[in-house]
């Protein structure tokens, strides 16, 4: 069983992506960002709460002048399902006008949340805007979105760990795990 966290009797947590694979991939992404923005500074915008661990690790693999900001979004609708209606719960603290912004998100599912956020940030006239996402469940996409820095494609399973939660739990697991059996 994983670390300190014990799932309910019926919940299973099988490792999908190990901490070592995550670390290797995050290092590659950080190096690519460092090359792509050579001589420039970047503003990493994390989507709370899920992206905070990915952003923390990714930022330390980027050898550039970098600053952080965070926002939070929520989608209306049934628990766990995107309804197509997104609203901003916490806005950025700083202006992004003229900045090289990298929007950092944990997982891309239907694409509804990231689409909303990309459109919103574009209206604020950044110098550039790119998207970094750790995990992509491409099968679930209902709104197309261009990802510039992708960690891993994953199957359509519900995953937790490394920032991702189920009902706010499991964010502190070191590996990315598939959660199953909670309803059975
Ligand atoms: P989208 O708007 O459908 O792309 O929703 C993306 C959001 O749904 C992510 O930011 C997560 O908060 C949540 N999400 C989607 N799939 C998972 C998952 O497998 N585990 C945990 N959260 C997920
Ligand atoms: Mg999220």
Image: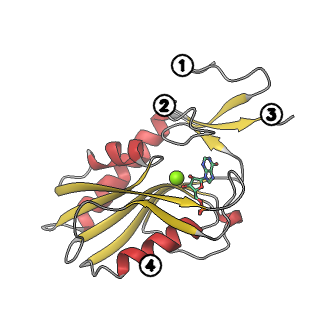
Q: Position of residue 7 (x, y in %)?
A: 68, 23
Q: Which residue is mark 1?
A: 3
Q: Residues within 10 Å of mark 4 (few under 14, many from 20)?
A: few
State the CA–CA distance, disc 4 to disc 1: 39 Å
Q: Residue at x 28, y 56 (%)?
A: 69
Please provide percent x and percent y for residue 123.
35, 82
Q: Quadrant of the C terminus?
A: top right
Which corner quadrant holds the N terminus?
A: top right
* Numbered circle sitting on residue 172: 2
Report how far apart the C-alphas of labels 4 and 3 lie in the structure: 36 Å
Residue 126: horizontal and vertical position, in percent?
26, 77
Provide the residue designation for mark 4. Answer: 119
Proximity of marks 1 and 2: CB atoms separated by less than 8 Å:
yes
Residue 66, quarter of picture: bottom left
Reading the image, the residue beneath label 3 is 181
Q: Residue at x 19, y 77 (%)?
A: 98
Q: Is residue 33 left or right of residue 99?
A: right
Question: Alpha-carbon distance for marks 3 and 1?
Answer: 19 Å
Residue displayed at 57% across by 33% down: 169
Q: Earlier in the sequence, mark 4 or mark 3?
A: 4
- Could you classify mark 1 by the number of other residues whose Cα lies within 10 Å: few (under 14), some (14-19), or many (20 or more)? few
Q: Looking at this view, is 20 or 94 the one in front?
A: 94
- Mark 3–mark 1 CB contact (< 8 Å): no
Mark 4 and mark 1 residues within 8 Å of each other at the beta carbon: no
The residue mark sitting in front, 4 or 3, is: 4
> From mark 4 to mark 2, how far is it between C-alphas?
30 Å
């Amino acid at each position: 069983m994983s670390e300190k966290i014990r799932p309910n009797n019926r919940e299973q947590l099988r490792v999908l992506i190990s901490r070592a694979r995550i670390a290797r991939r995050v290092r590659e992404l950080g190096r690519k960002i460092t090359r792509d923005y050579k001589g420039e500074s970047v503003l990493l915008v994390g989507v709370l709460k899920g992206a905070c661990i990915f952003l923390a690790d990714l930022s330390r693999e980027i050898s550039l002048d970098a600053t952080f900001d965070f926002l939070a979004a929520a989608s209306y609708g049934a628990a766990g399902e995107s309804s197509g209606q997104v609203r901003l719960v916490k806005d950025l603290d700083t202006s992004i006008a003229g900045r090289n912004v990298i929007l950092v998100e944990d997982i891309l599912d239907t694409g509804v949340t990231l689409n909303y956020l990309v459109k919103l940030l574009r209206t604020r006239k950044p110098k550039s805007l790119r998207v970094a996402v750790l995990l992509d469940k491409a099968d679930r996409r209902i709104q197309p979105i261009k990802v510039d820095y992708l960690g891993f494609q994953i199957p359509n399973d519900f995953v937790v760990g490394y920032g991702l939660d189920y009902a706010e739990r499991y964010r502190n697991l070191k590996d990315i795990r598939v959660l199953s059996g909670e309803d059975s």
